[in-house]
Image (cartoon, rainbow, N blue to C red):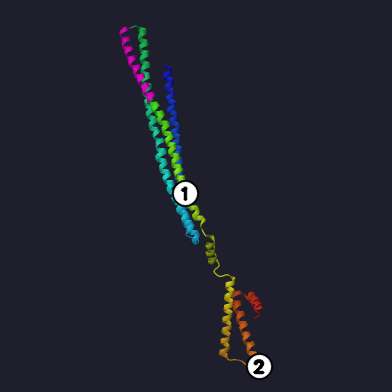
Amino acid sequence: RHRRDNQTKQIQEMVTNVEKHFGELCQLFGAYARKTARLRDKADLLVKEMNVYGDTETPNLRYGLKHFADQLAKVQDYRQAQVERLEAKVIEPLKSYGTIVKLKREDLKATLSARSREAKQMQQLERMRQKNPSDRQIIAESDLQRATMDATRTTQQLEETIDDFEKRKIRDIKKILGEFVTIEMAFHAKALEVYTTAFHHIQNVKEDEDLQVFRSTLRPTDYQSRLEIVRANSGSSLNRTGSIKTMSGTLQVRTGGINCNFFFCFILVSKSLFSYLENIYGQGEARFFSLHYNF
């Protein structure tokens, strides 16, 4: 009897240990899946922001950001599948052990009840032996025999069911953790492939072309272009001065072989050009041009 009591105690401890640690694993894997789902949600927001930002950028960078965001969105699709598989292949099997442990506790309770009945019958038989009534002693011995057989039967059933429970526990924990690793490997393999494509998209952005676009929007005309405009306008001013000369007639005054008409035209052109430059660049730069070009 002492051996059977030790056996029952050992079985109780084993069932309690499984209930405790499988419950902890179930909670932690559940938290892991929820964290993964929250990471998926944050990444979805990141994809949205990249698309919004890409709409404001230069052509090559916009193209790179859009395709990078598309690849990141694919990763989140794989992450969603990862969460669903974790719930189905890992969390649910662990959760089912709550019911399994409950059934084993009921089996253990039935065995303990049978042993308790056996112990009561033995006590009753001992009391009858002390009183020496032969007929009652025979009845008590018969009841004790039945109780002993019942206790032996339930003990044997308990040993068998606990043995099956131990086998199933080992098999299930191997399968559950194997599924977890397979799910993680599948996700990371797909993610690595997609992230590689995303990396190439963002690295293939042509910086020089976008820089040219940026500079053209920031500085549509540079200093050299402005100088060319000044020169072109200077030529048109000379043409306008020639027209004035044609309309007003030619002043021919010769004094000592010098053509006064030439000086008159030169003075008109110089004043016109200086006034134009002064209006555009101010008096200081107009003087610089007049000294540099001798007018």
121 or 77, nearer to the observer: 77
Residue bearing mark 2: 254
Q: Amino acid at mark 1?
A: Glu
Task: From the viewer's perspective, tell me whether residue 78 is left or right of residue 211.
Answer: left
Q: Which residues are magenta?
A: 133-160
Residue drawn at x 60%, y 80% is 273
Find out whether the residues at labels 1 and 2 contact each other: C-beta distance under 8 Å. Answer: no
**Residue 295 screen position, x and y as percent:** 65, 81
**Residue 279 screen position, x and y as percent:** 59, 77
Residue drawn at x 37%, y 10% is 127
The 10 Å Cα crowd at callout 2, few under 14, some 14 to 19, many 20 or more, is: few
Relative vertical location of residue 218 with respect to residue 144 in this rendering, above or below: below
261 or 192, nearer to the observer: 192
Residue bearing mark 1: 193
Residue 152 within the segment the image draws in magenta: yes
Task: From the viewer's perspective, tell me whether residue 221 is left or right of residue 83.
Answer: right
**Residue 75 screen position, x and y as percent:** 45, 49
For mark 2, give the secondary structure: strand
**Residue 11 screen position, x and y as percent:** 42, 25
